[in-house]
Image (cartoon, grey):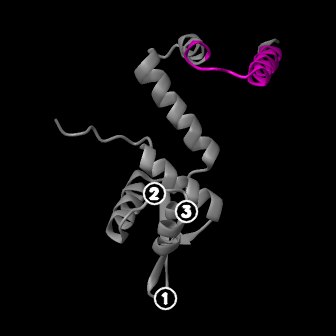
Amino acid sequence: MPRRKTRTLTEVELEFMQVLWDEGEASTEAVQEALRRRGRELADGSVRKVLAILITKGYVTRRREGRAHLYRATVPQQEARHSLVADLLGRAFGGSAALMVASLLDGRDVRAGDIEAIKKLIAEREREDQP
């Protein structure tokens, strides 16, 4: 069965985006080298293919400089995170944030500092929602 096409980022696409968010703007060669340093070895053609997919999805734009193209993220990192979380929330948890948080807390070791930070975020949100 063919893979379903999605507007959200795949694992590999997210790695590419991380490079572009970190670098600001990069050539295919610079992206390939940054990925190599992160442990992801990809051929030049594969790098170009993923960048083309990201352009199609609207996450990246490119501009010509001399004989090369420079790629830049068009979607801010925080917006992409929100999109990924919203997709996961809808597909895996039927839209229930409570189920998603419960799964997170039950499924892995959560540091005490993270729990305190989550409590603080909830308290802030509750204050914002009060008239």
Q: CA distance from mark 2 to mark 3?
A: 7 Å
Q: Secondary structure at mark 2?
A: loop
Residue 69 included in the magenta stretch of the image: no
Residue 3, by quadrant, is: top left
Quarter of the figure with the C terminus: top right
Mark number displayed over residue 40? 2
In front of the other: label 3 or label 1? Answer: 3
Relative image position of residue 30 (x, y in whole percent): 53, 72
Residue situated in front as seen by the camera: 49 or 104: 104
Q: CA distance from mark 1 to mark 2?
A: 27 Å
Q: Which residue is identified by label 1?
A: 66
Q: Mark 1 or mark 2: name the one nearer the start of the chain.
A: 2
Q: Main secondary structure of the magenta part?
A: helix
Please say if the residues under marks 3 and 1 sit with CB atoms less than 8 Å apart.
Answer: no
Looking at the picture, which amino acid does disc 3 mark? Arg
Residue sitting at x 27%, y 37%: 4
Residue sitting at x 74%, y 24%: 114
